[in-house]
């Protein structure tokens, strides 16, 4: 019974941690978000918010509630720093300064450049390796899986939502699984001699 109780307590603690982070559990943050939404996210105030919101922000899916969370996050961070505390996480993530509609600008740019490198390597591979090569279809498929993963990584770091987060993680997992499959095909199922040793995304990953 004691062991079962301990397991239930651990599960409850894990669920509590998963539901939020230190920053978004702070009363000052929650009160700030609630007050911001009451002032700006209903009736005529909401129409005013939408009228002054840049078009690129609305196209990227930034809502009034999202804007309130962003502004209140930095209010809370400022209070933490004034009291000499470390910067807290919010909703499981560290706070980042938004640039235009990019929620995490540096990460978005890095993901885009990785995707661009994968595309360049794919083009080089297709021009230098004959399509009749045994590894050609597997390597090209791996390149497209990598490109898809970097695309969703760029989207996720540009605009963090439940959908983009899941797509980022699932597509990254697909790259890992396809890498394992590619290694099995290359080193187990096919003879080593006479097969291209590199795939188009090998240098980009």
Image (tube, rainbow, N blue to C red):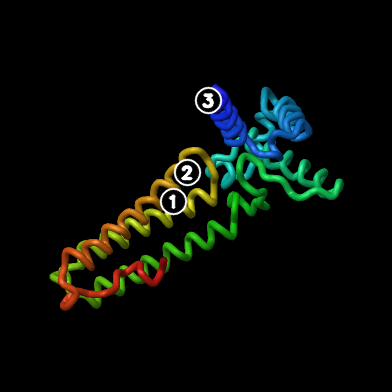
State left or right for residue 195 relative to residue 1: left
Disc 3 secondary structure class:
helix
Q: Which residue is tagged 2? A: 164
| SS assignment at label 2 | helix
Residue 18 pos. (x, y %)? 58, 36
Q: Is residue 151 left or right of residue 73?
A: left
Mark 2 surroundings: few (<14), some (14-19) or many (≥20) residues within 10 A: some
Between the C-alphas of marks 2 and 3, the distance is 37 Å
Q: Is residue 131 above or below residue 32?
A: below
Q: Foreground: 112 or 162?
A: 162
Q: Quadrant of the C terminus?
A: bottom left
- The residue furthest left is 132
Where is residue 150? Give x, y as percent. Answer: 43, 57
Q: Spatial distance from mark 2 to mark 1, Cα to Cα? A: 7 Å
Circle 2/circle 1 CB separation < 8 Å = yes
**At 66% across and 51% down in the image, what residue appears?**
96
Of circles 3 and 1, the one toward us is 3
Q: Which residue is under mark 3?
A: 4
Identified at 61% across, 46% down, the residue is 93
Give the residue number, with chain letter if any, for mark 1: 152
């Amino acid at each position: 019974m004691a062991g079962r109780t301990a397991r239930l307590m651990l599960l409850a603690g894990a669920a509590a941690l998963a539901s939020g982070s230190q920053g978004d559990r702070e009363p000052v943050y929650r009160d700030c978000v609630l007050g911001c939404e009451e002032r700006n996210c209903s009736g005529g105030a909401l129409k005013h918010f939408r009228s002054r919101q840049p078009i690129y922000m609305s196209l990227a899916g930034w809502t009034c509630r999202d804007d309130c969370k962003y502004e209140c996050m930095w209010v809370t961070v400022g209070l933490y720093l004034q009291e000499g505390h470390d910067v807290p996480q919010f909703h499981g993530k560290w706070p980042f300064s938004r640039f235009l509609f990019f929620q995490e600008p540096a990460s978005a740019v890095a993901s885009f450049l990785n995707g661009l490198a994968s595309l360049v390597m794919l083009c080089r591979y297709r021009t230098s390796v004959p399509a009749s090569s045994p590894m050609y279809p597997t390597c090209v498929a791996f390149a497209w899986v990598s490109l898809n993963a970097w695309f969703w990584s760029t989207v996720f770091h540009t605009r963090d939502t439940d959908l983009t987060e899941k797509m980022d993680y699932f597509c990254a997992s697909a790259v890992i699984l396809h890498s394992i499959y590619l290694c099995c095909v290359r080193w187990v199922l096919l003879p080593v001699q006479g097969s291209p040793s590199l795939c188009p995304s090998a240098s980009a990953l």
